[in-house]
Amino acid sequence: MKIEWEWTICLIFMTICVITDIRKKEIPVIVVALSGGCALLYTVILGEKEWSEILYSLLPGACLLLLGLCTKESIGYGDGLAVMAVGMWIGWKGCIIAMISGFLLSSICALALLICKKVRGKSRIPFLPFLAVGLGVFYVVEKGI
């Protein structure tokens, strides 16, 4: 069985970020920077991706950063940076699928919490746990499990 290093490292990165996002409602920038740097080095050393593909993989996260700026951090900058790092590991298509899945799941969860009156309209819920589930959805779809 071949070890899929991209997914293994992405899983470790996401686990650390999800735990801190749930506990502290913040994402450790040092972990994001290390993951992004490792992804860039890994990609450059192996030379499997074109530079254009690497730049495309950063776009979903850049869009989240812009959205965070426009919404006064309703979506945190850490989420955008984490999505950029994830995009470098799994590519832009997987990143978009994971993001859409994460948005759908988080909106369903938020709606359920609002209906049950566990949160109010301005309450914040962490996004990265939903992104992690979206990554799982993408992995299952990609591998045909």
Image: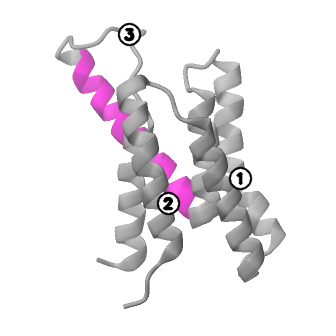
Q: Of label 3 and label 2, which has the lower sequence position?
A: 2
| x then y, percent, for residue 101 | 41, 49
Disc 3/disc 2 C-alpha distance (Å): 32 Å
The N terminus: image quadrant? bottom left
Please name the colour scheme applied to the rendered image: one colour
Name the foreground residue: 123 vs 2. Answer: 2
Q: Which mark is residue 121?
A: 3
Q: Give the residue type that dot 1 points to.
A: Leu
Q: Give the residue type that dot 3 points to.
A: Gly
Name the foreground residue: 27 vs 86. Answer: 27
**Outermost residue, left direction?**
116
Disc count in the image?
3
Q: Of label 3 and label 1, which has the lower sequence position?
A: 1
Q: Give the residue type that dot 2 points to.
A: Cys
Q: Which mark is residue 69?
A: none
Q: Are marks 3 and 2 in contact (CB under 8 Å)?
A: no
Toward which corner of the image does residue 93 lie, by quadrant?
A: bottom right
| x then y, percent, for residue 86 | 57, 55
Q: Are marks 2 and 1 in contact (CB under 8 Å)?
A: no
- Disc 2 element: helix
Residue found 63% across the figure and 30% down from its top: 77
The C terminus: image quadrant? bottom left
What secondary structure predominates along the stretch shown in magenta?
A: helix
Mark 3 or 2: in front is 2
Residue 32 drawn above or below residue 126: below
| x then y, percent, for residue 97 | 50, 56
Residue found 34% across the figure and 79% down from its top: 144
Q: Which residue matches tag 2? A: 10
The magenta stretch is 94-114
| x then y, percent, for residue 80 | 62, 38
- Disc 1 element: helix
Q: Which residue matches tag 1? A: 58
